[in-house]
């Protein structure tokens, strides 16, 4: 695409991605430097349409960002008021785990809110626009402009290209968005961030990132069953002791229940299906009783970074920096990353506001600001908990986590993660196949009816945005060794094996993609490359998701 | 030459809207809204005519809540010159919309009103026809091809038994079929420029137009799902199924 003549536009600051990190950065920058020209682009068709989270919001960062936030929006109508935690022994029995708030501060949700993170972003976008930030949803960043080893901005994707790569009658070339500084806020496993990791070797001295896949359903339940502010978490069944994950269930808003399941993408059994595990978790009585009789109104999925402190890459490079989950500030035991994402965006804004004056090429002081902020403090406290689950299994790690939390992580050791998630799969022949039952269409569902609720828009004549680097490897590795794990870890049914004269063939239904990024993460040979499709494509998560 | 293009903000065609639990209507709060696809064809055609040098000004108009301004901005980004927002919180039916449009036709004096043949939310397919009747103007509906001349417009209509070619003296009303053209993408630079184009706002209640509804929704239900078909292997099996499963013979 480099030989196309492109329009150019210049800004002081360009932000890629309108999640909590990107929007908080934009707001803080305008507060500090009202005259700065700030452009924010977002690949979703509108703000919030690709945002997935539980979500429980800890308002620490919001307190620092916007005065009187609680009164300014109806996003915060559900404070957390009652909380339970279950260890599920099997499909029927459970143990209620006491939440010792004084001993395990990160488990304490007093003062937090159950929100739709999409709606929070919609509101933050309004706040940002009122301050003069220019926000453009529907435009995806496709390439990073790097000149003389300095990031100068990004190129948005072309529109109106057909499957063969030819221009259609309504073809519009992407534009060059140039800025003094570019902030990458793409969220977990951003496609441009991935290119930056490589170009600037940002991950060379840190642990590999480890990921989770969150799959979520939004339910509308009868008013007499609704308990706004009630939240619960579970772990254990249906996962085995060596697979990390668990469920959340939050009552909030107007008769809404957010139910979801996070599964560590470092799982080993290639037969495992995160989607099916999520479906069968709903059959457990402690979960089922909340949603049975309601109707499912939304479905979404998104990968998240679980590596914590040990996996945070170098955060800056000439011309820009990384914020939010693109860098990986999620606090795993807290199961929260919104507050750290927002705070990182604010610290980045403070750095850039200064850099616009000093004109330093690499905004290096951002790393120090992160290092001396409460983000670092809280991630340091919990740094050993997620790795303990990978090393010791769920039962032993739960005990370890209890101990580690009580001493606030003040132990002389730091546990490390040495392998990438995609290196952990075992051969299919060495693993047991879980028995997943057919959906009942009341409580449990199949992938097709699920993504129907994601309101996917994907012009089907556009080029396939999920590419195999080498199509032959699929047969020799993915099929012969792992029996096509992508057909199971993809929660949207993008990958399908068709038999052609007894010869397996991989079909990629890219129009089903809901942008969770699992395939880019978990493919055993890193043969799948997730690239941004035409701007505005993908799911359209509605308000409440 | 001036063209007026009415545009409507509707539920985006990719969204599967839910019926409200009390069956009074469709839940539209917090879901993605977009320009009615047929109106995109109308804007596209108007912009193409302007690019051919046949049109001097394109005015887009929308009636609805303040958010309809987003739809007008899309029209401006595609190439309309100015926009009119008639602000109201009421949902208007075709007759009322036609009356409001009549008011602005008299005010703006366009030579041609180019509009979607129907809106994808209620599929009424009536506003263009009612507007033509009220103004006493010629109408060309379901148009899939259009040639504009100085004092008439030649159109091809999609009809049951083929295509019909008509000449309409101007001023006229033309409603568009999806086949008319392929609407363009609003490019990023054009979206930026559109934010600086003028949008005139009027309050519907102050115009003195009677919008009293004549239609009432009793109850809204989802259509029952279509059962999946099966392919039978023999006539005997078919007869058996018709007798024992479907119980129709």
Image (spheres, coloured by chain):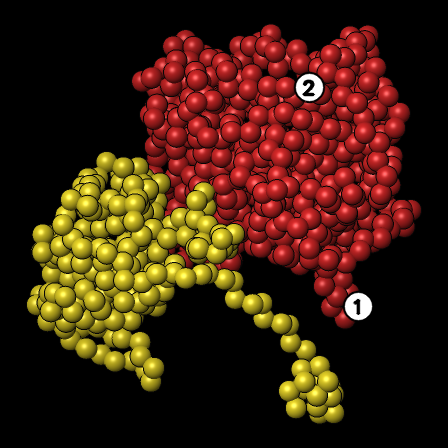
* C-alpha separation, residue under disc 1 versus residue under disc 2: 55 Å
Name the residue rendered at 46%, 50% in the picture.
Answer: B27
Pick out the residue farthest to the front: A224
Name the residue rendered at 16%, 53% in the picture.
Answer: B209
On the image, the x and y values in percent for residue A241 come to 87, 34
Front in this rendered view, residue A470 or A435? A435
* Tag 2 residue: A108
Which of the 4 image quadrants contains residue B119? bottom left
Name the residue rendered at 46%, 30% in the picture.
Answer: A74
On the image, the x and y values in percent for residue A532 come to 53, 43
Are there few (<14), some (14-19), or many (20+) residues within 10 Å of tag 2?
A: some
Report the chain shown in red. Answer: A
Quarter containing the C terminus of chain B: bottom right
Quarter containing the N terminus of chain B: bottom left
Question: Which mark sits nearer the N-terminus, 1 or 2?
Answer: 2
* Chain B pictured colour: yellow
């Amino acid at each position: 695409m480099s030989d196309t003549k492109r329009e150019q536009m210049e800004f002081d600051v360009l932000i890629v991605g309108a999640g909590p990190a990107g929007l908080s950065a934009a707001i803080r920058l305008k507060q500090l430097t009202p005259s700065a020209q700030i452009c924010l682009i977002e690949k979703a068709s509108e703000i919030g349409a690709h945002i997935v989270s539980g979500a429980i919001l800890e308002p620490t960062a919001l307190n620092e960002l916007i005065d009187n936030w609680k009164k300014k929006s109806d996003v915060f109508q559900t404070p957390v008021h009652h909380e339970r935690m279950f260890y599920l022994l099997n499909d029927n029995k459970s143990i209620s785990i006491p939440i010792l708030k004084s001993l395990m501060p990160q488990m304490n949700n007093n003062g937090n809110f159950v929100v739709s993170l999409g709606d929070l972003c919609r509101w933050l976008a309004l706040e940002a626009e009122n301050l003069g930030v220019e926000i453009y949803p529907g435009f995806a960043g496709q390439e990073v402009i790097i000149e003389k080893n300095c990031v100068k901005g990004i190129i948005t994707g072309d529109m109106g290209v057909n499957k063969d790569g030819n221009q259609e009658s309504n073809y519009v070339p992407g534009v060059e968005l140039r800025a003094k500084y570019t902030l990458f806020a793409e969220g977990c496993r951003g496609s441009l961030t991935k290119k930056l990791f490589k170009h600037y070797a940002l991950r060379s001295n840190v642990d590999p990132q480890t990921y989770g896949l969150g799959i979520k359903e939004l339910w509308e339940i009868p008013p007499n069953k609704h308990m706004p502010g009630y939240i619960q978490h579970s772990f254990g069944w249906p996962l085995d002791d060596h697979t990390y994950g668990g469920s959340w269930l939050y009552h909030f808003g107007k008769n809404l229940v957010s139910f979801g399941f996070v599964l560590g993408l470092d799982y080993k059994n290639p037969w495992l299906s995160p989607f099916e595990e999520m479906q069968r978790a709903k059959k457990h009585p402690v979960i089922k009783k909340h949603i049975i009789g309601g109707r499912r109104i939304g479905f979404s999925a998104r990968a998240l970074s679980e590596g914590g402190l040990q996996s945070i890459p170098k955060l800056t490079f000439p011309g820009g920096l990384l914020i939010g989950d693109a860098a990986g500030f999620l606090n795993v035991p807290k199961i929260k990353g919104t507050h750290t994402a927002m705070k990182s965006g604010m610290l980045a804004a403070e750095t850039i506001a200064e850099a616009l004056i000093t004109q330093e090429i690499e905004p290096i002081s951002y790393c120090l600001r992160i290092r001396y902020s409460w983000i670092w403090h809280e991630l340091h406290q919990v740094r050993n908990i997620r790795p303990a689950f990978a090393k010791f299994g769920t039962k032993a790690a739960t005990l370890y986590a209890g101990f580690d939390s009580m001493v606030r992580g003040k132990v002389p050791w730091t546990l490390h993660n040495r392998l990438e998630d995609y290196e952990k799969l075992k051969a299919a022949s060495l693993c047991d196949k879980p028995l997943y039952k057919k959906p009942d269409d009341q409580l449990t569902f199949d992938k097709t009816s699920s993504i129907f609720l994601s309101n996917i828009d994907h012009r089907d004549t556009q080029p396939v945005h999920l590419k195999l680097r080498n199509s032959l490897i699929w047969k020799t590795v993915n099929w012969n060794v792992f029996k096509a794990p992508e057909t199971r870890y993809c929660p949207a049914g993008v990958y399908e094996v068709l038999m052609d004269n007894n010869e397996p063939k991989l079909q990629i239904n890219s129009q089903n993609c809901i942008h969770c990024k699992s395939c880019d993460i978990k493919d055993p040979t890193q043969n799948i490359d997730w690239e941004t499709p035409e701007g505005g494509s993908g799911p359209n998560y509605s308000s409440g998701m | 030459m001036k063209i007026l293009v009415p545009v409507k903000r509707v539920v985006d065609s990719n969204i599967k809207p839910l019926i409200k639990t009390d069956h009074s209507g469709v839940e539209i709060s917090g879901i993605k809204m977009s320009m009615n696809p047929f109106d995109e064809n109308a804007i596209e055609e108007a912009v193409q005519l302007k690019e051919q040098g046949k049109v001097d000004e394109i005015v887009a108009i929308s009636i609805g809540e303040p958010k309809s301004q987003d739809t007008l901005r899309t029209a401006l980004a595609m190439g309309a010159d100015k926009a009119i927002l008639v602000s109201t919180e009421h949902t208007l039916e075709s007759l009322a919309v036609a009356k409001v449009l009549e008011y602005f036709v008299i005010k703006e004096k366009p030579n041609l009103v180019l509009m979607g043949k129907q809106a994808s939310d209620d599929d009424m397919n009536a506003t263009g026809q009612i507007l033509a009747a009220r103004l006493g103007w010629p109408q060309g509906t379901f148009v899939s091809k259009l040639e504009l001349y100085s004092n008439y417009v030649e159109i091809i209509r999609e009809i049951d038994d083929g295509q019909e070619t008509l000449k309409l003296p101007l001023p006229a009303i033309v409603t568009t079929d999806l086949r008319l053209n392929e609407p363009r993408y609003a490019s990023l630079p054009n979206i930026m420029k559109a934010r600086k184009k003028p949008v005139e706002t009027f309050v519907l209640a102050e115009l003195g137009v009677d919008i009293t509804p004549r239609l009432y929704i009793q109850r809204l239900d989802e259509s029952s799902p279509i059962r999946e078909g099966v392919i039978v292997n023999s006539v005997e099996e078919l007869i058996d199924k018709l007798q024992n499963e479907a119980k129709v013979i």
